[in-house]
Image (spheres, grey):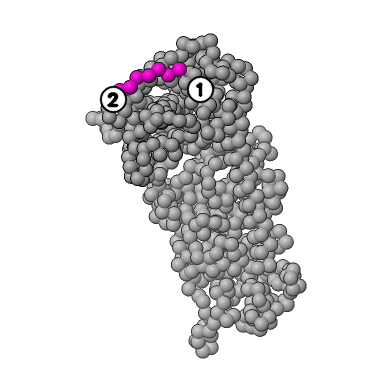
Amino acid sequence: MKKSTKSMILALSAFSTIALSGCGISAKEDFIIDFTYETASGTSVTEEITAQDILDRYLTNNGSSAAEAYYNAIYEVALREVFTNGRFQNRLSDAQADANRAVDEAKDAADTAGTSWEDYLIDTLSIVGDMSVSEREHQYYLQCEVNAMKEIVSDEFYNTFNQWNPEVDEANQDEVNQFNMVYGENGYIKTKLPYHVRDILIQVDADAANYSTGEISSDDAEQLYNLFEALVRSDSQTNTYADIARRLTDDSASATNYGEHLMDLDTSFINEFKLGLYTFDALYNEDIREGNADFDSLSEKFLMPSDVEEELKAVGPTYIPYEAVVMLNEYKDIDSYKDPATGQELTVNEGKASYYPRNIIFNKYFNSHNISFIVNQKVDSSDPAYEYALTDTGVMVKSDLDENGNYAIGQDAYFAEGSNEAAHFQQINGLDYPVLCDEKGNPIVVSRSETGNAGIHFVVIEKSPLENQATAEVKLNEYYAPVNPLEQNGQDANGNYYYNEEFPTDNNGNPLPTYVNSIQTTVEGYNERIYGNSDGGVTGIGEKYETYTGTQKEYQLFEWVTEGNFRAQDDSIQAKVDQYITQKMLSAQQTSDQNLIDSWNAYSTTLMDQERNRQIGLIPETCAIHFGDMDYYGEGKLCYYSTSLNTNPGSGSEGNN
């Protein structure tokens, strides 16, 4: 760490204590700062500002509690002190310039809206009382100046405490853990659990809320098949998972970024995507569970309610035999039956699309909202072995699914052992079969989205925050190090790249694979990985920190700037200020936590609805294999459908489905 956390603390400790009493300024009335303000006409006005002035201003704010007023006053006093006499005094002119610019922009906005400057100020400021336009403008400037100071302090805070390697810092480990809000014990990495993932979205026509008789197009079936064919032939050179995502995903926003996302507990993703990955790591991924001594608490890390956990364990993952992928493509254009005797094209079951073979295959294997994996197996083509009574009519229906919602998979491998395709299926500790993986050996997690882009997500985890750090090739602090691997583009006269010595390296001095260098190859590209970009196409580590802190950041900065040296003289008032901060931070965390818990409950409800519906609503797979065959589709047979007997698509007369 180039900047010492310890020296930052000592610098702040050098300031005199500023105490504010309940009725105004205390005996320490030496806090007087010259406040210079440049009016729109260019006139420079210099006034004195005291702690009493600042407190009075906040006490007259509409809707402001006493505790909030004192909090804001203490914060502003501290800011003005450090910008006038402290470590930020060389940035005071920047804050003033930003404030003047904000005032000018506000005046332009008022003109554009056809609003008088006085009315604009009255609407913008929450300060009550009779004031002239000039006085209101001064108040607005002060507000803008404080906001500018906060932005500068915020940037400095991040730059000071975003370091990835605490071993080179002069502060002791306790100080690093206390102040390092990205990599410390209470920092972003350990509290928000960021996942670096890649996603491929294939949108389909089928209604996401239809769990058993959804209908896809021929193009949908072909697109799914083409994706699987690319994945089963991926390599580490020209056909990586990232390359495939760029070419084939239907998510145009992430396509240019090779399907990449940086997802954490606060990220607003669809439940099947986000919670599906959490379910995999917390409940099924034994490598993750074995790397955590208290693996029973993994679900608690994700705030998974205990009843939801039991439901997810009962549902389990779904396995999709690769032959089903091939059948989906083979059947994609079949929507009628050719009479072998006459060659005539005939409609089947009155042309009902839910019986098209591609839709039967899609619904059984791909229309599942719990996590799924592709396995190198053939399908089980036998007739359905289970029978259930419809709750409303008592009519019996045949099903491929047992009482636990599981179906049989063929015992034979689809790709021969030793083939290049078969090598893409690897055994993941905790799963029942070897599953399709990317070129790095990451399992491809498949999930059907319930909302948003109604399609199927194919996700790999590039970096899980729950990896065993003792055995990980790249530690989390190294992986998310906000360091550019290059000092400049190009090569020197000897062909050597301008590597940055501060970038994480292995024992041989070679740069480690990290979030920053996982895609880009230029200084500018790497900087986008650190700081993000204005288009929003690349998520920067710094952006994630900003999002993580959110409401809490205001109070973190307050504690950092004041450092206990700026307090209300009255202990009871200071206690209320402290309580105000605690409540605000707790409220922000509680809101975030409740949002995640609500998502878990909604996800569980979806899976329970799905399980009930699929068990009696899925059309048996054999109806796709024997499409149009009168031994299956003749009247009274397994796949026969008649509207006079059946008002629920997918079920039939007694003994039929």
Residue drawn at x 54%, y 51% as measured from the top left:
270
Residue 361: percent from the left, percent from the top? 57, 67
Residue drawn at x 55%, y 37% as measured from the top left:
193
Q: Which mark is residue 615?
A: none
Q: Quadrant of residue 281?
A: top right
Residue 295: percent from the left, percent from the top? 66, 38
Can the viewer see residue 395? yes
Residue 15: percent from the left, percent from the top? 47, 12
Task: Give the distance between the C-alpha atoms of the residues marked 2 and 1, in whole angstroms.
Answer: 27 Å
Using residue 511 as the reference point, say whether residue 346 is left or right of it: right
Q: Quadrant of residue 359?
A: bottom right
User: Vertical placement of 601 versus 100: above or below?
Assistant: below
Can the viewer see residue 188? no
Q: Which mark is residue 43?
A: 2
- What residue range appears in magenta? 43-50
Quarter of the image for the C terminus: give it. Answer: bottom right
Magenta stretch encompasses residue 44: yes
User: Vertical placement of 270 versus 119: above or below?
Assistant: below
Residue 182: percent from the left, percent from the top? 50, 30
Which residue type carries mark 2?
Thr
